[in-house]
Amino acid sequence: MTNHNSPIGVFDSGIGGLTVLKEIRTLMPNENVVYFGDTARVPYGSKSKDTVMRYVRQIIRFLKTKEVKAIVIACNTASAYALFESALDEDIPVIGVIDAGVKTACNVTKNKRIGIIGTDGAIQSGVHAKMINRIDSQISVFGKACPLFVPFAEEGLFDTKLTDGVVEHYLSYFKPLDIDTLILGCTHYPLLINAIRRYLGDNINYVNPAYETACQLRELLLDSNMLCDADNTSVCEFFVSDCAKKMISFADMILGGENNKITALNIENY
Amino acid sequence: MTNHNSPIGVFDSGIGGLTVLKEIRTLMPNENVVYFGDTARVPYGSKSKDTVMRYVRQIIRFLKTKEVKAIVIACNTASAYALFESALDEDIPVIGVIDAGVKTACNVTKNKRIGIIGTDGAIQSGVHAKMINRIDSQISVFGKACPLFVPFAEEGLFDTKLTDGVVEHYLSYFKPLDIDTLILGCTHYPLLINAIRRYLGDNINYVNPAYETACQLRELLLDSNMLCDADNTSVCEFFVSDCAKKMISFADMILGGENNKITALNIENY
């Protein structure tokens, strides 16, 4: 049975979702959290809806064994597939990283021209455009898949000459389109923000869904009286489906070298 | 029960192994083949030995349901983990893509200085160096992981200015090392050969293990009287764990647009 001191479940295809976790911990430092990264099957962005949905259901079954009070799908691809068509029917709140970013983008755009960058899966799903046009059908939406951004971020190539090259390769698409807002539609992409900003300029609103999602989660818990006790000492547990060294060092980098304890498990058993 | 007309099983983490399949079909056009690509869990190169070995065992169980007479692990990472330490004990021959390439490299090097490029997993395993030094302990071996080469190849960026940049990023390591031989230790890498050759020059022997492995397989079948009948009409079956569009178009590109029939299955059930 869950109660207000039960943990929040957060998961991602890998470790990109740690950027979302970081925003949640900054905003709600007392909350207990269980994080799961599907590092054995990362990435999701190039995989089909059926496969990603099977993985999502396994992970939700696992998180429920930890009696979580709410779940954040901290992965744009999985959010795109799982949430837009109400493919999930759970007895606890499940939120994704798309909804909050889309709302913010609709609020800040002046010229009603919004760009989205993301994985193949997220962009092909068309979910951002559909959600934006539900809010305001006058907004033009331009999506561009940037499959190399995740491997670049995982190689630590955040801000190099090579990064400038790959940013130009994908983002030249936006140059003639006169967008004033860009949604960073993949949890890894904020890591490349310097190179992206250098190429597209400072006159664009860059929307980071990780931050917006943490705000949305806080509001949801507040509204349902499910925030933890103010004197709770936060416990964070980390689980992965594969404990490769590279993943652990990436986690330590994002979470600030706290020497985080990470447990590996076989997610196929759930 | 298998016999000489039973199919050859070939598998890879994804579709890179199709380059090996292509060499097998060129050399032995009458053989029946069952190919499995683990597209739901690709890539293996960044994952741990335990996880990759669990996947390898599932795939071998699946291929055995197809009554294959021999298995080719057409993936350097899986070959590195599965074969060097005899982690497999099967009643049919199982060969990898490392052995044959290593032997060729040892034969062609004049100055006894060999370079290897591959995934994180393959390079960190040190398997190439160990196998080379078993053959000739005087040979110096220099390994370099090139994690971005696979995503570049899967993006179709075989021979662009951006490819030149990423090639220089990794291969500048070899410039002062005076190697005369380079093993392309990942099935995707031959697709980038133009950019690699342009950067390192024509005075290096480039060893493509896909071709060498097909030759080794033919010899093995010949020696054990297991080549198929000379008038056999080849049947090739393709299976994947995820049927994403991108994967299918990549397969058609490598296999020559034959509109190949590909069946998806849940490999976690094996």
Image: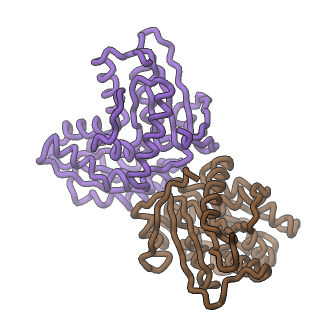
Chain colours: A brown, B purple
Residue A77 in sight here = yes
Quadrant containing the N terminus of chain B is top left
In the rendered image, residue B101, in percent from the top left (x then y), is placed at 29, 38
Q: Residue at x 65, y 70 (%)?
A: A68
In the rendered image, residue B78, in percent from the top left (x then y), is placed at 39, 44
**Which of A18/A141 is in front?**
A18
Count the labels in the image.
Answer: 0
Q: Is residue B166 above or below residue A25?
A: above
In the rendered image, residue B91, in percent from the top left (x then y), is placed at 35, 27
Left/right of residue B107 with respect to residue B212 in the rendered view:
left
Residue A161 in sight here = no
Q: Residue at x 41, y 50 (%)?
A: B195
**Which of B5/B99 is in front?**
B5
Left/right of residue B190 with respect to residue B103 in the rendered view:
right
Q: Residue at x 19, y 36 (%)?
A: B107
Q: Is residue A95 above or below residue B216?
A: below
In which quarter of the view is residue A34 placed? bottom right
In the rendered image, residue B59, in percent from the top left (x then y), is placed at 47, 38
Q: Residue furthest front?
A: A1
Left/right of residue B123 with respect to residue A10 in the rendered view:
left
In which quarter of the view is residue A123 placed? bottom right
**Which of B181/A184 is in front?**
A184
Q: Residue furthest right?
A: A137
Q: Residue furthest bottom?
A: A231
Q: Is residue A209 above or below residue B241?
A: below
Q: Residue furthest left?
A: B138
